[in-house]
């Protein structure tokens, strides 16, 4: 039963989109299990650049069913724009399916996201302002509107009327004008009409694929340390990017997960607020941001940059029970004389080798670095491990040894072809 989870092993933006595209060609089902259009996945295929925020990158493969999973929160307008843009770029796409249990993001969610952020003042989280937190709040409060209801005109009208009354009260508390039911219903009914053919219960379909032994890829968004429970709370997103979230967001039980690959960069980035022990808030960080083009796909914000934090990565390996690492952006670290990796932290004069769970404590740690020799040259033409410079291989070996997790795949450029499969056996279980 080859069911594979792909999870971000850092703070998101690890280049999961490219990997899902590469492996999506081998899967009959690709299901995204969490988040919304706070995520941004860029895929470069056959010289074309595709940007996805909601649709699983597996859509680029005809014959693959690309599923917007039950654990997601979906902006209908954003989804339709993405769909229209993608079919203009490529005619032969996979089949798009949207879970009837996914929650709908409305304009009041986006407005409240921005208003709540402003109200946090200096404690702001640095959210993407896509309404993600407020949409998940509604889900937990059991007042959210799910896709199944959204595409049923009678139920949608009744639910929206109810919810909008409460939301308008909240908006008014922030001094904002109330939203008009008629306008909102008219606009969103038109989206619902277009989305209706794509919406269905996904759980039986996913279960049948798993039972039939088909290859099922469960695609994560964001990253381990943005997880609501396991991340650097409260500087986290409102969903479950960790591998456990794949079960919740797709309806698959844990016994059916065969392999979990954790995607990590050769350095670390983070968007938004929160502690970041190996951050390089200096010229070196600026240099890596520039050569790595580390600007958000969704918000365009410059990402915070730091050295690779192996203490955090090992924690991610444990939290997700990773079968293997997918190491991306090795090409970006070429031409550094030496490279630092954090192998421990100093906390109040003592050495610790774990990631503290409390953000105030995490903010106090100082990384203890191990220095590795760099390498030179353009790695993008490399197609096997033996093509890589010796010191680049030694860097990968050091990561694997410290985290006790083998390297399964190495990415040395944005194109599909710029991928080295190291351990085929770790991919589909
Ligand atoms: P939200 O998900 O918009 O609520 O934002 C919460 C935190 O998660 C913020 O620090 C965001 O910058 C971060 N975040 C959300 N989505 C992503 C992503 O796809 N990549 C990196 N950071 C993200």
Image (tube, grey):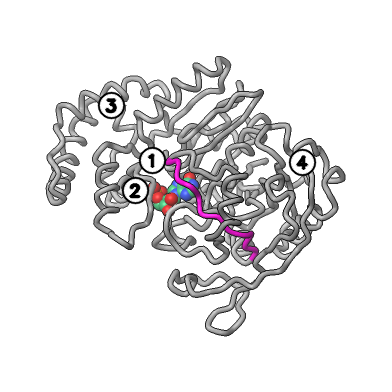
Residue position marked by numbered label 3 in the rendering? 152
In the depicted view, which residue is nearer to us: 101 or 164? 164
In the depicted view, which residue is nearer to us: 362 or 220? 362
Contact (Cβ within 8 Å) of mark 1 with mark 2: yes
Judged left or right of residue 27, residue 178 is left
Q: How far apart, in angstroms, are the residues tagged by discs 2 and 4?
A: 43 Å
Residue position marked by numbered label 1 in the rendering? 73
Residue position marked by numbered label 4 in the rendering? 378
Q: What residue range appears in magenta?
A: 299-310
Q: Earlier in the sequence, mark 1 or mark 4?
A: 1
Judged left or right of residue 261, residue 162 is left
Q: Earlier in the sequence, mark 2 or mark 4?
A: 2
- Find out whether residue 308 is within the magenta segment: yes
Residue 123 in percent (x, y) is at 33, 62
Determine crowd level at label 4: few under 14, some 14-19, many 20+ residues with C-alpha closer than 10 A.
Answer: some
Q: How far apart, in angstroms, are the residues tagged by discs 2 and 3?
A: 21 Å
Residue position marked by numbered label 2 in the rendering? 136
Contact (Cβ within 8 Å) of mark 2 with mark 3: no
Determine crowd level at label 3: few under 14, some 14-19, many 20+ residues with C-alpha closer than 10 A.
Answer: some
Q: How far apart, in angstroms, are the residues tagged by discs 3 and 1?
A: 18 Å
Q: How far apart, in angstroms, are the residues tagged by discs 1 and 2?
A: 7 Å
Disc 4 or disc 3, which is closer to the eye?
4
Q: How far apart, in angstroms, are the residues tagged by discs 1 and 4?
A: 40 Å
Q: Earlier in the sequence, mark 4 or mark 3?
A: 3
Disc 1 or disc 4, which is closer to the eye?
4
Contact (Cβ within 8 Å) of mark 4 with mark 3: no
Q: For the residue with label 3, is its CB less than 8 Å from the closest atom of ligand 1?
A: no
Q: Secondary structure at mark 4?
A: loop
**Rendered image quadrant of residue 182:** top left
């Amino acid at each position: 039963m080859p069911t594979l989870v792909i999870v971000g092993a850092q703070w998101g933006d690890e280049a999961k989109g490219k990997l899902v595209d590469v492996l999506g060609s081998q899967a009959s089902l690709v299901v995204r299990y969490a988040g919304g259009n706070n995520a941004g996945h860029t895929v470069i295929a056959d010289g074309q650049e595709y940007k996805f925020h909601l649709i699983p990158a597996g859509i680029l493969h005809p014959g693959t069913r690309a599923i917007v999973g039950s654990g997601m929160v979906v902006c209908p307008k954003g989804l339709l724009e993405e769909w229209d843009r993608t079919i203009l770029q490529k005619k032969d796409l996979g089949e798009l399916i949207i879970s009837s249990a996914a929650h709908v993001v409305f304009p009041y969610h986006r407005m409240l996201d921005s208003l709540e952020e402003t109200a946090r003042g200096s404690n702001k989280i640095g959210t993407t302002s896509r309404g993600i937190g407020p949409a998940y709040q509604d889900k937990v409060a059991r007042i959210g509107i799910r896709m199944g209801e959204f595409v049923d005109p009678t139920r949608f009208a009744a639910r929206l009327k109810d919810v909008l009354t409460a939301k308008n009260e909240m908006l008014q508390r922030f001094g904002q004008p109330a939203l008009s039911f008629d306008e909102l219903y008219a606009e969103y009914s038109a989206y619902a009409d277009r989305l209706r053919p794509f919406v269905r219960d996904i759980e039986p379909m996913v279960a049948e694929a798993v039972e039939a032994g088909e290859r099922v890829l469960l695609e994560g968004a964001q990253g381990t340390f943005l997880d609501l429970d396991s991340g650097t709370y409260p500087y986290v997103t409102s969903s479950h990017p960790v591998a456990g979230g794949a079960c919740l967001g797709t309806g698959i039980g844990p016994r059916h997960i065969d392999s979990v690959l954790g995607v990590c960069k050769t350095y670390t980035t983070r968007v938004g607020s929160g502690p970041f022990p190996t951050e390089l808030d200096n010229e070196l960080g600026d240099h890596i941001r520039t050569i790595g083009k580390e600007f958000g796909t969704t918000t365009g914000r410059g990402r915070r940059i730091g050295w690779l934090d192996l203490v955090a990565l090992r924690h991610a390996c444990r939290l997700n029970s990773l079968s293997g690492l997918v190491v991306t952006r090795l090409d970006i670290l070429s031409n550094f004389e030496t490279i630092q990796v954090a192998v421990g932290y100093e906390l109040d004069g003592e050495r610790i080798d774990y990631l503290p769970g409390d953000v105030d404590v995490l903010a106090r740690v100082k990384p203890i670095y191990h220095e590795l020799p760099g390498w030179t040259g353009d790695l993008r033409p490399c197609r096997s491990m033996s093509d890589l410079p010796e010191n680049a291989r030694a860097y990968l070996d050091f990561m694997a040894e410290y985290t006790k997790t083998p390297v399964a795949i190495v990415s040395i450029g944005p194109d599909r072809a710029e991928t080295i499969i190291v351990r085929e056996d770790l991919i589909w279980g």
